[in-house]
Image (spheres, helix red, strand yellow):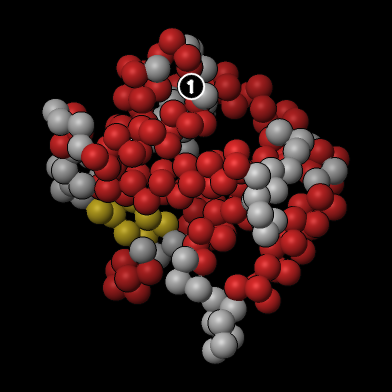
Amino acid sequence: MLQLHEVYGNIVKVSGLIGHPDLLFVFDGDEIRNTFRREEVLPHRPAMPSLHHYKEVLHKDFFGDCPGVIGVHGERWDKFRAQVQQVMLQANAAKNYISPLNDIADDFILRFDKLVDENNELPGNFLSELYKWALESVCRVALDTRLGCLSENPNPESRNIIAAINMFFWRVAEVELRLPVWRFYKTKKYLEYIGALDHFRK
């Protein structure tokens, strides 16, 4: 991503991906704002084909008519968004989470001292630590609970969730940005990707 930005600038279009829609990467905050403001009332954003297949084909019985906001367009997207935005956009609702999210951020920063090596550098797998912080924060807001992802010894369920998150992010690029072989043959990486999604569904 950084290389795309450095070589091509603030707005980059990647096209010609076999079996995938064109991708538009916007690296400038002002341009992101302008892009969203120019959208129609019911925008159409190309879905992640594999995620769409997961929700609409493999597990339509589970998701039904409410598969969320990712990969959904038109009236179904608007209906789901309307159900959550009234709460999420209220200033008072956001204020309620300042303190608990600040506590999570403090816990995350405290981990730095335990993670740095003798050269005062963070480990190569630090991205996994960022996932833990993000997961802990999201669950505190969405589920009103803490999973213990940032503790020294997270419980087994937390470890499984962290592993599933890591697997999802490791495999989603392989599944979504490469030749979509999964449409015809279920590769090992595709099955690992589906396994990660299944963990959250269950």
169 left or right of 116? left
Say which of 156 and 77 sits in front. 156
User: The residue tagged with tag 1: helix, strand or loop?
Assistant: loop
7 left or right of 149? left
Residue 114 x/y as whole percent:
65, 73
Q: Residues within 10 Å of mark 1 (few under 14, many from 20)?
A: some
Residue 75 to residue 198: above or below: above
- As shown in the figure, which amino acid type bears the numbered disc 1? Pro
Residue 1 to residue 140: above or below: below
16 left or right of 101? left
Say which of 167 and 75 sits in front. 167
**Split into 4 quadrants, where in the image is the N terminus?**
bottom left
For image coordinates 42% across by 37% down, the residue present is 196
Residue 124 falls in image quadrant: bottom left
Residue 63 x/y as whole percent:
48, 17
80 left or right of 180? right
For image coordinates 55% across by 54% down, the residue present is 131
Identify residue for label 1: 67
